[in-house]
Every structure is written in structure tokens, then in C-alpha cells.
Amino acid sequence: MASGPVQLVWFKRDLRVADHAPLAEAASRGPVLPLWIVEPELWAEPDASARQYRVQRDAAGELRVDLAALGQPLVVRVGEAVAVLETIRRTHGITALWTHQETTGAFGHARDRRVRAWARARGIPVHEPRQTGAIRALASRDGWARRWEAFTRAPLVPAPSALEPVAIEPGRLPEPAAIGLAPDPCPGLARGGRRAAEALLASFLAGRAETYRRAMASPLAGWSACSRLSAHFASGTLSIREAAQAGRAARSRAGGALREGIDSFLTRLAWHCHFIQKLESEPALERRALHPAYEGLRVDGAGTERFERWASGCTGWPFVDACMRCLAETGWLNFRARAMLVSVATMHLWLDWRPVGLHLARLFADYEPGIHWSQVQMQSGTTGVNTIRMYNPVKQGLDQDPDGVFIRRWVPELASLPAPAIHRPWEHGVCGYPAPIGDHAALAAIARERLWSVRRGDGYRRVADAIQLRHGSRRSGMRQTGRRVGAQTALDLET
DNA sequence: AGTGCAGTTGACTTT
DNA sequence: TAAAGTCAACTGCAC
């Protein structure tokens, strides 16, 4: 039992022992104190919710077991990060602080700055390797794809073979209510933790990926055809590198549709990091429109009737409501449907993307700030880089749920209507289901004209080109010889 | 058999 | 894997 100073490994959203460089490096240098800090202030942020916490708590519980098997269970403390670290420093002494770089919102940035300042003042070295393909202080997007390849092809870091026990009370994993989280019923929430991550990865690569390409656009088929690993990447129970290497190995053994599905999956792993890179390079992404010409364009909307109808799945557009209710009850929705929910809110209902994004963030059990805010801005057309994508809620329903199975499941008021009538209930007089907020085609036309008039404004293009240079993928969207080529990056990010 | 025409399909452009 | 509009080429049918 070690009694001297410890190598402190601070787990954040990297709740695993495999491919965990800080843990491995720390363990090679002396006794390790593995720590998970539950920060009530973080969980009080407007983008946080109990379902996200439950996923991370599941993961921390399994991590505690895995670390205990190595010799030292996960230590859990509740409080402000610097205060928790300072208490451990006083009682045990800290030789070095090991943690993964985290790309996250303003709270996390400020907290990491405080921790670094505290460590500097106490003479504690901080080691912070990265765990995604996002690069801190990136000078240029040129060559990013090559660096992502190199990062994901680096050897996996083996878990330490044993940890020397440290004399410390491990502490309990608090219930959501104990840290001030509001009740957040989510009966269909998928369990977090390493065991589930491994099972999902295996079943996806062994067969589910076969229908991935065709089915990922549908919220119904995507439920089983998508990898469903997003919450595991967000909590770190599986590293991107582990997934990429397992995917490449499975790809080499597979053929036909399975191979194509795995190819799409690997592409999306790169996109995952590509979007996190945007927030890493531009922390204001969660607060300000990337292209300032879109700032102040829409009404804030929070608390208005149309916002509440959208947020509660009562817009009167069946496919939209089915998607929102599915998300509320399960914490998951496929990428395309998420994009449509943003599109309807920010285009048809002309609501500001910030409150819209916060509502969705809380409903996403797999909330990943970098991906989320990049996507919310892209789908609401405020990046200035991508083509304006406006989804027709009826067409999407007809395309992705032609028989109405998904709508019937989540909007039981419409169960008696056959398809295709179920996609336009206002034409068939249904009781117990609201009339639509408006004529979606007319609302779309108004939004389209407003957004295109911004694009035609003076100086718009000059700013847009600068944004493309800073954030855009080098594969598409770059201006070539004065003419814009394929201004949109085609992607569905769902994993 | 060849012509005229309504309707469909797909490439492409615009918003 | 945006949607809607345009237009040319094509198809199938009637006569």
C-alpha cells in the first residue's frame, strides 16, 4: 500500500483503461491515484442533463471495476476540480497530473485553465496527451487528414498490468439528484460502459454494418443499422483509435455490402474528429454564428409557443414529432433526423440556433460539444460555408418512413391513419393531434428568401472564404480558379 | 411506318 | 444523404 505522493490520473470523458496513454504513462512512474471528479457546476450548465450523466456514471462504475481488478479502484469525488485536487495534494501529495486533452465548452475551458494555473503554482507537472484527432493550437487545416490517419494508426496503448494500491477512500458514485440534476426520464436510454461498447463494436463490424449505408438515413432502420457507439465515444469507453483499428481489421476480412458499410463507418470516424476540431480551433462556435452576417437574424424563441411545440413534439408535422418524441424517450436519433429537427426549428419556425441547440444537447445522451455545435450551425445555415440545407418534413417522412411505422410508434394519436395519409393528417381530419404550426412549404420559402438575401449581402463572400480556409475540409468546398465547386460537404455523421 | 404528344427520367441550376 | 425548378432526351401510346 503506497503512502507517498501519487501520479494522479484525472479521468474525464475517457472512462476506460484500454488505449489510455495518461494511465499507462503514470503507472510506469509510480503509484497511481485514478480520479473521476463529478463537478456539480458542470452538470448545472444549460447543455447538461441527467441522461448524459447516467451514461457517464455507468461508464465510471465499470471503470471502477476494471481499475480495481488492476489493484486500485477509481476514486470518485464531488466538487469543484481545483478544490478536489488541492485536497488530494494536501493529504497524499501529487507528483504529476495526467489527463487527456478535452475539447469542450466554455465551462471546461475555464476549469482547465484554473487547474493548469493551480498545478503551475504548486510545481506539479501536467501531462495532457490527446485522445481524438483534434489538434490543439492547429496552425492550418492543410494536411489534417494525413495527421488523422497517423494518429489512428499509432499502436494502441496497453492497459497497465497492475496498479499499486493507494491508501484512500474510493467514494461513492452519486445519483443524478444528489448533484442537483433535474429529473430526466428517458426509459429507452442505452446503458453506458465498456462492456456495452465492446458488444456494439463487435456486432456492428460482424454484421450490422452491412445495411449501414442504406439504412442510416432512416430513424427506424438506423436504430439497428448504425453502430450506436456515439455515447461511448462521448464518454470515452471506446477510443476513436480502437474503433478505427478494429474497423480496418474487419474491413480487410469483409466483402460486399459489409465492407462498404465499414468503409462508411471509418470515414465517419474521421468526420467525428473533423467536427471536434472546429470547436477546438474556434471555442466561440457554441456562442456565436461562425459567419457574423447571420448574427441576430432570428428570434430567440425560447419560451414561445412555437418553441415549446417543437421541443415537446407537438408541431403537427408527424415525422418531426415522431423524431422529437423518440429522441426524448431514448436519448438517440440518427444523424439525418437530428439535422431535420434543427432545420425545422431554425428555418420553418425561424428560432435562434442557440436555444434550439441547448434543448437538443440535453436530449442527446451522446452529447459531444464539438460535433453538436458544428452541426447545429451547419444545419441552421450560420457557418457561411455550407449550402443551406432545408429539409421538407413531409418529404423526409415519405422517404424515410414510407409505411408510417416510425410515426405510428411514436405518435400513437395517428395510429389509425394508413400511409401515406399519416404524413399529412391535416388533410384527413384527425382528433387528438394538433393542426400543423403552419404550411411548411410557405414557411420554408420565407426562410429560404431571408437566408439567401443575407448571402447576397456586401462582403458576405469575403468572410465566407476566410471561414472555409480556417475550418473547411480540404476534400471539398474549396474555391478553385474563382468558381465554387461543390459547396457542400456531403455527410451523415451517424455512428 | 411514321408522327405527334403527354408523361417520365435524369442531369443540371438556382434558391 | 436539400429542395425545387428547368430542360432536354426518352418512352409509350394513339392515330
Image (cartoon, coloured by chain):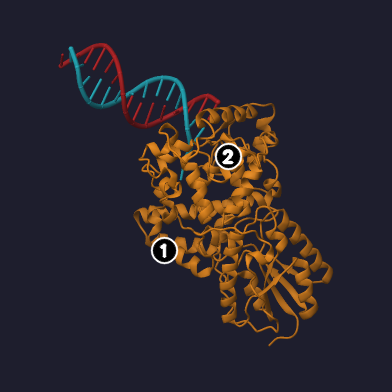
Chain colours: A orange, B red, C cyan
Determine the residue located farthest toward the right in the rendered image: A121
What is the spatial separation of the Cα atoms under label 2 and label 1, in whole angstroms? 35 Å
Please name the residue shown 61% across and 66% down the image: A14
Label 1's element? helix
Residue of label 1: A203
Residue A413: quadrant of the picture: top left
Say whether residue A155 is visible: yes
Label 2's element? helix
The amino acid sitting under disc 1 is Ser
Residue of label 2: A345
Question: In the rendered structure, the residue with mark 1 lies on which chain?
Answer: A
Please name the residue shown 70% across and 82% down the image: A168
Residue A143 image position (x, y, % from top left):
60, 50
Please name the residue shown 68% across and 88% down the image: A1
Residue A208 image position (x, y, % from top left):
39, 58
In the shown orientation, is residue A26 left or right of residue A147?
right
State whether residue A232 is above or below residue A403. Answer: below
Residue A378: quadrant of the picture: top right
Looking at the image, which is closer to me, A304 or A143?
A: A304
